[in-house]
Image (cartoon, helix red, strand yellow):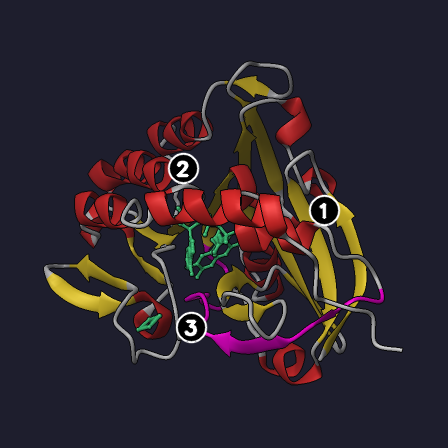
């Protein structure tokens, strides 16, 4: 059992949780994820390790379905049945000085802070761009501002920062002719597809963190397959970060919708019957 040490909302729909998981915390690096199972009958879901502090790891998640909504009801002192990790290949962070741009959209912003910190620690110049639909959905702004050398904040409706999408400041930076060595883009699939198109004409190495449905997280089940550079890859062991300009986005976006009916049925069932089994350990 894994103790939840801290848990609180970051916005209406996004929550953060610090979990005591020493084995995971001591081995985890930026870009890796863990698989969590809230209770013995629960589903396993992958979540990025968004922070590490001693024996603790942080997860930051959007409550959108059965398991994430269940997680959002838990608080400090509750326990999770399983936390498996760290999984996946760490971010490809080079020793500086390089100039890197790290772009986060929506809940994807939560996954950028740990990459920005690792890039900064490696002696790089780090430019952050974070975006959300509106001011209330912007998360981690202060934390990321403290890490980055420059930070741009965007909201779709202009209620905070620059009006428009996170791709806007990225386009401006590329057009300015400033030297950019690497870009990371993390967010919803469509946002990563569109935003990575910005860097393509400039031949800037651009990474995205892909989020296909995962089950075992160890390369055995094949559920997380993605097509990159025309070859089939398993995101859990070959990724989750891949060269954005080589990802077959159409394949990925279609596969992500495969279980929409089952996911809707599951949430309806659990909203009608759910009784939380993630008890406090006495
Ligand atoms: C490597 C990786 C890292 C991720 N990191 C984060 C994160 O840090 N924060 C965050 O909010 N989300 C993250 N996700 C997505 C997260 O796993 C899903 O939101 C979660 O599984 C939804 O489960 P649910 O039961 O609440 O919702 P459901 O209703 O079951 O599903 C809602 C949507 O979530 C996705 N999803 C469902 N099950 C899975 C699964 N087993 N694996 C992957 N995606 C699934 C599907 O696109 C689905 O349409 C990550 C996904 C991957 C693959
Ligand atoms: S999740 Fe099973 S192979 Fe990747």
Q: Residue at x 28, y 66 (%)?
A: 223
Residue 44 visible (yes or no): yes
Label 1 CA crowd tier, 10 Å (few <14, some 14–19, many 20+): few
Decide if ligand 1 comes within 8 Å of the CB at mark 3.
Answer: yes
- The verdict on residue 84 being magenta is yes
Q: Secondary structure at mark 3?
A: loop
Q: Main secondary structure of the magenta part?
A: loop
Label 3 CA crowd tier, 10 Å (few <14, some 14–19, many 20+): many
Q: Can you identify the residue that label 1 sits on?
A: 143
Task: Report the quarter where the N terminus lies.
Answer: bottom right
Q: Residue at x 83, y 76 (%)?
A: 281
On the image, the x and y values in percent for residue 166 come to 46, 30
Q: Residue furthest front?
A: 273
Q: Residue furthest right?
A: 282
Q: Residue at x 16, y 66 (%)?
A: 232
**N-terminal label among 2 and 1:** 1
**In screen coordinates, is 208 left or right of 135?**
left
Q: Can you identify the residue that label 2 sits on?
A: 178
**N-terminal label among 1 and 3:** 3
Q: Can you identify the residue that label 3 sits on?
A: 88
């Amino acid at each position: 059992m894994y103790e939840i040490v801290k848990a609180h909302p970051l916005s209406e729909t996004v929550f953060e949780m610090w979990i005591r998981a020493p084995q995971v915390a001591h081995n985890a690096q930026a870009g890796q994820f863990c698989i969590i199972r809230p209770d013995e009958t629960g589903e396993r879901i992958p979540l990025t390790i968004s922070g590490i502090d001693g024996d603790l790891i942080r997860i930051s998640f959007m409550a959108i379905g059965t398991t994430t909504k269940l997680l959002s009801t838990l608080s400090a002192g509750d326990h999770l049945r399983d936390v498996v990790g760290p999984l996946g290949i760490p971010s490809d962070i080079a020793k500086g000085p390089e100039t890197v741009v790290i772009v986060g959209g929506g809940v994807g912003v939560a996954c950028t802070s740990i990459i920005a910190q690792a890039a900064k620690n490696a002696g790089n110049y780090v430019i952050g761009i974070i975006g959300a639909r509106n001011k209330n959905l912007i998360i981690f702004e202060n934390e990321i501002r403290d890490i980055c050398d420059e930070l741009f904040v965007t909201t779709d409706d202009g209620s905070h920062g620059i009006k428009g999408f996170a791709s806007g400041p990225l386009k401006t930076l590329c057009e300015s002719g400033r030297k950019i060595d690497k870009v990371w883009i993390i967010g919803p699939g469509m946002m990563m597809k569109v935003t990575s198109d910005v860097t393509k004409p400039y031949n800037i190495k651009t990474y995205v963190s892909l989020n296909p449905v995962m089950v075992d997280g160890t390369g055995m089940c094949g559920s997380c397959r993605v097509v990159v550079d025309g070859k089939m890859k398993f995101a859990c062991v070959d990724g989750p970060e891949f060269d954005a300009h080589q990802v077959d986005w159409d394949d990925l976006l279609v596969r992500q919708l495969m279980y929409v009916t089952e996911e809707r049925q599951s949430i309806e069932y659990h909203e009608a019957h759910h009784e939380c089994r993630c008890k406090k350990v006495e």
